[in-house]
Image (cartoon, grey):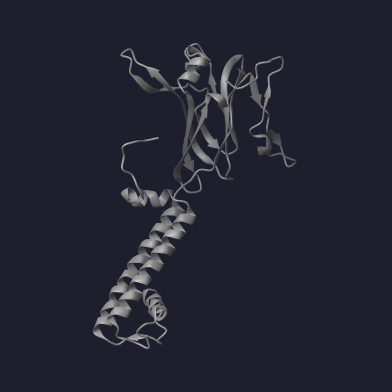
Amino acid sequence: MQFGLRRHFYSDVYHSWLRAPWRMAFAAVTILYLLVNCLFAVAYLLVGGVENLGPTSYADAFFFSVQTIATIGYGHMVPISHAANALVTLESLIGLLGVAMATGLMFAKFARPTARVLWSDVAVVAPFEGVPSLMFRVANERGNQVVEAQIRVVLLISEETKEGVTIRRNIDLQLRRSLSTVFALSWTVIHPLTADSPLVTHTREELQLGRAEIIASLIGLDDAFNQTIHARHAWGMDEVVWNARFVDILGTLPDGREGVDYRRFHDVVPLAGQAGSGRS
């Protein structure tokens, strides 16, 4: 959480627009459209000079504004004074600019590359090829391929410097494989717990006291959009299961292709003969 920054929607409108949910985007466009027409309806009533427009009929003025801004022109109500024609000219210009901007903003949201990456709910610690290792799963939820996918994993922990200053330190975790040429199905990311691993040099108590988190970041090239996508996930120390491994989810389909059973993607089982399979 950040403090001391005066941040609101209007400080970076375009960035806020791209990150806003679609329901908020449609609501904003609708409200702005109605607001503009409401204001012009008031202006038409004040200026007058519109044929067949009742002098006190706000509904007629509103619908005349809608017809004008959308360049519909049914012909029942028409401006007959210079003031009304000037107002129609202004509203038509605003309508053209509004349509152009709304089209561009909507396209920008549609064209924005997004990743649909599934991360395992927990990370596990279990032997891999004879070496105790931290492991977690990541999968591509789309049917496409992510080319040259790269994963970086860091341990984020609060520590004190020699001067007694508390800092939030990022420590890179070395991976057995940090690059996948084609990321299409599932990927088990593995960090060996060697002597220099921060998960070994720090005790579990130190990790808990330091509010340690394991943060993974994935980037790659979406072969459909030909654009870079990214995804990120974090696990707290209470989401690390020791002495357990993930359930196997890879299998062969009847047609010979390799498939993934995502129904058990997050499932783990304790290691045989290990009693301490709880989370750290």
Tell me what residue is drawn at x 32 percent, y 69 percent.
94
Where is residue 169 shown, x and y percent of the image? 39, 22
Q: Quadrant of residue 36?
A: bottom left
Q: Is residue 194 above or below residue 235?
A: above
Q: Quadrant of the C terminus?
A: top right
The reply, left or right, for residue 202 in relation to residue 275 is: left
Left/right placement of residue 202 relative to residue 184 reads left
Considering every residue shown, the one lying at the far top of the view is 195
Please say whether residue 121 is visible from this viewpoint.
Answer: yes
Rendered location of residue 193, percent (x, y): 53, 16
Q: Residue furthest right?
A: 254
- Residue sitting farthest toward the front: 56
State the image coordinates of residue 195 (x, y, percent, origin top left): 50, 11
Q: Is residue 119 above or below residue 8?
A: above
What quarter of the picture does the N terminus occupy?
top left
* x, y percent for residue 142: 57, 45
Q: Is residue 260 visible?
A: no
Q: Residue at x 65, y 16 (%)?
A: 276
Indicate whether 158 appears above or below 42: above
| In the depicted structure, whether residue 46 falls above or below residue 136 | below
Quick one: 208 or 92, which is closer to the camera?
208
